[in-house]
């Protein structure tokens, strides 16, 4: 099973700041990595798939990069609605796996 | 508008069974693989099971293999998850999820989820 490790566990930032979230895979997943945003009491929302493809309706301030084992989700300038938990997920190998999540909180 | 509506959750005793259903609308159901993803209270996301667009191929997490069965009825746009030999650790909100494409196992639409509680 491919283990995804997200860091940091919590990121404390102010609105307008840049957020950089990391997801590291225990073995190569090529570019088959997705990112989701989840707010309290809500289902997750797909942000990025296949490392760098923005999902439909996702603002341009969200971008993804990386390949192999190291991936990054960048939020260029945090809006108030961006404070949430972010999950990564790989689809390279079965079983599909998720990372443990990074919480982006207001500083 | 894509909609995924889960039903069938609730409280069940350890060792019991439950069948979840997901009614899909707003897209051509038979063109997409579907999955179930769960989230235990206060925990992260865990993929549970996947079924191909025509139902001919299924996959399961090791934690549920042999106990859960995924199925679909493309004539009724419905996805199912039959759960048996339930354990306390199966307690979670279960989400029905649609894949981006038949070979792209990223999930672009999620149901709101249905709570399954396994407890005596």
Image: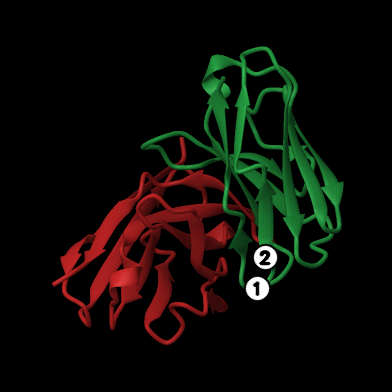
Chain colours: A green, B red
Image quadrant in which you'd find residue A48:
top right
Chain of residue at mark 2: A
- Say which quadrant the C terminus of chain B sits in: bottom left
The foreground one among B11 and B50 is B11
Residue farthest to the top? A16
Residue B102 horizontal/vertical position (percent): 65, 60
Q: Which residue is mark 1?
A: A94
The foreground one among A18 and B85 is A18
Q: Is residue B51 visible?
A: yes
Q: Secondary structure at mark 2?
A: loop
Residue farthest to the left? B120
Q: Residue at x 46, y 40 (%)?
A: B2
Chain of residue at mark 1: A
Q: Residue at x 75, y 21 (%)?
A: A76
Decide: is B75 above or below A59. Answer: below
Image quadrant in which you'd find residue A2:
bottom right
Image quadrant in which you'd find residue B68:
bottom left
Q: Nearer the viewer, mark 2 or mark 1?
A: 2
Which of pointers 2 and 1 lies earlier in the amino acid sequence? Answer: 2
Is A86 placed left or right of B11 in the picture?
right
Distance between mark 2 and mark 1 Cα atoms: 11 Å
Q: Which residue is mark 2?
A: A3
């Amino acid at each position: 099973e491919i283990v995804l490790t997200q860091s940091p566990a919590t990121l404390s930032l102010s609105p307008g700041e840049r957020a950089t979230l990391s997801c590291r895979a225990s073995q190569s997943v090529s570019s088959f990595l997705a990112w989701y945003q989840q707010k309290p009491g809500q289902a997750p929302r797909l942000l990025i798939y296949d490392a760098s493809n923005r999902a439909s309706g996702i603002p341009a301030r969200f971008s993804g990069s990386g390949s192999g084992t190291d991936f990054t989700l960048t939020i260029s300038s945090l809006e108030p609605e961006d404070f949430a938990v972010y999950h990564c997920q790989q689809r390279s190998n079965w079983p599909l796996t998720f990372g443990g999540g990074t919480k982006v909180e207001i500083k | 508008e894509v909609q995924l509506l889960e039903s069938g959750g609730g409280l069940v005793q350890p060792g019991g069974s439950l069948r979840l259903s997901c009614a899909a609308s707003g897209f051509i159901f038979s063109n997409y693989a579907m999955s179930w993803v769960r989230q235990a209270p206060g925990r992260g996301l865990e993929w549970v099971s996947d079924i191909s667009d025509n139902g001919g191929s299924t996959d399961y997490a090791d934690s549920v293999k042999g106990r859960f069965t995924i199925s679909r009825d493309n004539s009724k746009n419905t996805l199912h998850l039959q759960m048996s030999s339930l354990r306390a650790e199966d307690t979670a909100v279960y989400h029905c999820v649609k894949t981006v494409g038949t070979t792209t196992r990223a999930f672009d639409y999620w149901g709101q989820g249905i709570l399954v509680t396994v407890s005596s």
